[in-house]
Each structure stands twice: as C-alpha cells, then as structure tokens.
Image: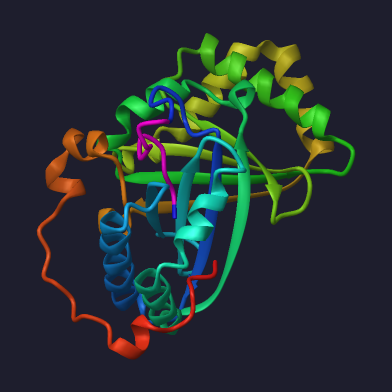
Amino acid sequence: MVATAWLLPAQDATQPPKVLLIVREDIKEGKGGAHEQSESRFMRAAAAAKFPANILGVNSITGTAQAWFLEAYDSIESIEKSRAAMRNPELGGLDALDGEFRSGSRSWIATYRPDLSFHGQQLMQTLPKMRYFNVITMRARPDHEQDFAELGKMAVAAFERSMDGQPMATYQIVSGAPNGTYIFLEPCASLRTLDAAPERSRNMFQAMGDAGAKQFTKMAGETIAQTETLLFAIDPKMSYVSPQIIAGDPAFWAPKHEEPAEPSKDAKSAGKRSK
C-alpha cells in the first residue's frame, strides 16, 4: 500500500509522510484483475471502519507482477494503531480472501530523509494529478552509508542548480531489508517524464562541473552495491486517500465502479490481515 496527503489531517500535508509502512504483494499470474477487486473491497471497508492510516496502492508495470501499498504515518509508534485495527473481523476476513491471489508478500518500515529528497513539498502539491511512480531502490555497501548520504546531497544540489522540475521523496528502510537500503519515489503525471530522464541526468552532471562529476561517479562506484528501478501505476481502486487528494481530481480518485460480489461469511470470519 503507498500514501502522502494521501495523508490524514494530523499529518503535515506540505511534506511527504515521516514514516511509510510499505507492503509488497506478489501477485499470481492471471490474478491481477481479481486482486484489484479484492483490494477495492478492502479499501471501502477500511474507509467505513475509519482505518487510522491512509493508503496509496500501485501496480507494477515493469518487473514481476507486484502491488505495493504505502501507509503514511507520523511515527513508527503510530503503526500500532493500524495493526490493532486489523483485528476488525471484516478487514481480517477480506485480507484472508485476498490471500488467494498472492504468492507472497513482504513489508518494510521506511523513514523520510528530507536531506536526500528534492522538492518534497511540490510532490505533495502535485500528487492528485500523478498517475505513476518511478521507484528506485538502492543499497549502500557495508560501512558506506555516510558516503551514500554525501552522494545524495551532491545530487540534490546539482538538481537544484540545473533547475530540475522532477520532485523526489527519499526514504531509508529501517526494518525489513538489509541495512543501507533506500527507496526514491518519483511521481509522474505521464510516461513522458521517463523520456526526459537522460536529459535530466546530463543536466545534473553538467551542473556538477567536470571535477565534481568525476568525483561523483567515482564515489558512486565505491558506495552503491545495488540499484533497481521499477515503474508503477497508481490504482485509485486500491487506495484509501484523503478528501483533499480526491478533490484534486475526483474523476480519477473516485471512479464509478460495479460492486464486486460480497465475500462469504466464512471469508469474513477468517484470520486477520497479516502483511
């Protein structure tokens, strides 16, 4: 699940969430549509139950068949409220039903790194019109996290000097993945943004100057152990976002849909949602 001013009123709607609980679900082949319907039921039930965290759901376009859900929080402690809410019999039953369409799942807790992010406020302002997320996952080599932070600050400064317009929210995973793992979230209104990526990269290096670009490239090779880039499409049916987000583009965030069949009583009484 993914979230921001996908945010609840208590959160600062001008900045990305301080904490994300990110849940990755691996979807069985041919079960994407059924999984979307199942998650849509869950999100409507979550809204009715006043689930204490808003959720942004996205489906992978590249890589393996995955659905990610990002829950937004003010602190790691506040995640406890959502885990308690999952004891709701209806939510637990719907999650058990959803298990039919998954081959596995994994969860991470990640904290926002404003020092390694770029124009986080702009990200929040434009989110209602966004349709995709380019997600870059990087892992620093052991004992190189300080070097990784320095690299990130160099890149942010260069983006600023080149007057780059692409916002990016950076999160450091603090539980659920190897130490030194970071996730960069780049929202996109259209896939045209990816066509401009090579030019943005060239502009960044030009802004660094020859000496700075050489230093950056050398440090990156010594510091970064692994990089993976995945493209996701935002799915409003699998999201539970704030009224402010919906008001930004109601035709997208609150689409009319046919009601899927209700789960059986046996499914409703099944075990709690465990992600």
> Nearest the camera: 68 or 226?
68
Q: Is residue 80 above or below residue 67?
A: above
Q: Identify which residue is drawn at 44% across, 49% down.
A: 2
Q: Which residues are magenta?
A: 2-10
Residue 243 placement, left or right of 117: left
Q: Is residue 171 above or below residue 126?
A: below
Examine the structure image and report whether residue 7 is included in the region drawn in magenta: yes
* Viewport quadrant of the C terminus: bottom right
Q: Quadrant of residue 78?
A: top right
Q: Main secondary structure of the magenta part?
A: loop
Q: Identify which residue is drawn at 34% across, 81% down.
A: 268
> Nearest the camera: 222 or 31?
31
- On the image, the x and y values in percent for residue 124 come to 37, 28
Residue 157 placement, left or right of 217: left
- On the image, the x and y values in percent for residue 128 come to 26, 36
Q: Is residue 96 above or below residue 48?
A: below
Colour setting: rainbow
Q: Quadrant of residue 125?
A: top left
- On the image, the x and y values in percent for residue 76 come to 61, 42
